[in-house]
Image (cartoon, rainbow, N blue to C red):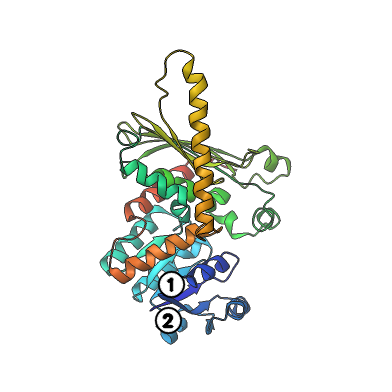
């Protein structure tokens, strides 16, 4: 039985606690927050036996083996280092750290001490993302992706985060080098990094404040990004983050030599896109029917997952948490390869180096 602890008892902590409790081989023994009332309320609501306001005291008293860190990004590096040096396996919420240098140091420390560490890139464990990965490995594209197109959307109207950020001039997100973007885009960038063949891609980025933020005088926040990523050889990627698109899409499309694949995290879809291969006007009549069939198959696939109770809102976090615990118990590879975590951090560093001065 793995003894689990959690540091940082804010809003996202509820999701982690709920998923920790779903795993029969794990027991949540303690929660911790610098504000004792925050720790106590979480412990009371979820019947956690111990709560603390000091990490060192928590580790000494409970002997926790795995720690989930859900604190602001600026604290991830020092907390991750402290926990690894204390002999704990670590689940760090996204963004993993503030800089790629910090990321590299934590990954090297975990490797040197024989411990596991992972990033909260849970969207890579959505059902459609897993199916996408399996099809790519099976050769559906006809080789590695030649071009990757990823789009991630967000709305400032989101009540628990968007409005809170705009209403608080001292919000911790504002002090990040990439402000709002830095706290959010690692989900999308990690999707791209998984399929890049290089460890040091080249990045050209255009960042700006949306017309909405300009209109309310909050141009210290950057909320729009258009980036082009190149591996230096043959693979390219485009990444878009926007708060302006009504469709609110969160999609990645992989284009290969023989076919393409589109995964939609908003609607839990995976759509295979093959050349029609029909002559003359037949392609215009039959290709839409093939696409309609693909969408129907997605619908039935999702219904089956729902009936098996594998389709709840946080199923991706449950899957990532379970894979992480399994890697610890069986001393297997971490669920997210360290190379992908580091490439994600390097791309983000390169993007935020191109933030225009306010």
Cα–Cα gap, marks 2 and 1: 9 Å
State left or right for residue 357 relative to residue 332: right
Kindly check if marks 2 and 1 are in contact, taking CB atoms under 8 A apart as contact.
yes
Q: Which mark is residue 67?
A: 1
Residue 114 spot, x, y in % from top left: 27, 69
Tell me if I can see residue 190 in this picture: no
Query: Is label 2 or label 1 in front?
Result: 1
Label 2 SS: helix
Task: Compare residues 23 and 72 and report the one nearer the observer.
Answer: 23
Task: Compare residues 77 and 19 and report the one nearer the observer.
Answer: 19
Tell me if I can see residue 304 in this picture: yes
Residue 64 spot, x, y in % from top left: 41, 79
Task: Compare residues 42 and 241 and report the one nearer the observer.
Answer: 42
Residue 333 spot, x, y in % from top left: 29, 61
State left or right for residue 113 relative to residue 212: left
Q: Which residue is label 2 attached to?
A: 59
Q: Badge 1: few (under 14), some or many (20 or more) residues near its Cα, within 10 Å?
A: many
Residue 81 spot, x, y in % from top left: 38, 68
Q: Looking at this rendering, what residue extends furthest in the right direction?
A: 216
Q: Mark 2 or mark 1: which comes first in sequence?
A: 2
Residue at 54 percent across and 45 percent down: it is: 299
Residue at 59 percent across and 60 percent down: it is: 172
When asked about the image quadrant of residue 243, the answer is top right
């Amino acid at each position: 039985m793995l003894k689990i602890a959690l540091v940082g008892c804010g809003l996202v902590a509820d999701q982690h606690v709920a998923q920790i409790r779903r795993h029969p081989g794990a027991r949540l023994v303690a929660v911790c927050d610098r504000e004792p009332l925050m720790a106590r309320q979480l412990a009371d609501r979820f019947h956690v036996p111990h709560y603390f306001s000091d990490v060192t005291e928590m580790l000494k008293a409970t002997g926790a083996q795995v720690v989930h860190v859900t604190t602001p990004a600026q604290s991830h590096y020092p907390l991750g280092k402290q926990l690894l040096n204390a002999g704990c396996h670590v689940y760090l919420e996204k963004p993993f750290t503030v800089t790629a240098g910090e990321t590299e140091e934590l990954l090297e420390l975990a490797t040197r001490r024989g411990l596991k560490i992972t990033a909260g890139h849970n969207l890579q464990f959505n059902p459609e993302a897993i199916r996408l990965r399996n099809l790519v490995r099976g050769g559906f594209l006809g080789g590695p992706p030649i071009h990757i197109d990823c789009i991630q959307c967000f709305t400032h109207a989101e009540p628990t985060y968007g409005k809170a950020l705009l209403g608080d001039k001292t919000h911790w997100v504002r002090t990040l080098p990439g402000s709002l973007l830095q706290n959010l885009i690692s989900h999308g960038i990690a999707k791209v990094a998984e399929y890049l063949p290089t460890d040091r891609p080249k990045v050209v980025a255009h960042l700006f404040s949306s017309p909405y933020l300009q209109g309310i005088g909050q141009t210290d926040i950057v909320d729009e990004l258009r980036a082009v990523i190149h591996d230096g050889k043959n693979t390219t990627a485009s990444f878009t983050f926007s708060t302006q698109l009504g469709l609110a899409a969160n999609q990645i499309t992989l284009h290969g030599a023989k076919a393409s694949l589109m995964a939609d995290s908003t609607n839990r879809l995976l759509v295979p896109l093959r050349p029609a291969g029909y002559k003359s006007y037949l392609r215009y009549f039959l290709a839409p029917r093939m696409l309609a069939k693909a969408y129907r198959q997605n619908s039935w696939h999702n219904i089956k997952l729902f009936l098996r109770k594998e389709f709840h809102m946080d199923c991706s976090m449950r899957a990532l948490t379970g894979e992480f615990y399994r890697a610890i118990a069986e001393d297997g590879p971490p669920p997210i390869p360290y190379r992908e975590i580091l490439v994600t951090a390097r791309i983000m560093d390169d993007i935020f180096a191109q933030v225009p001065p306010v």
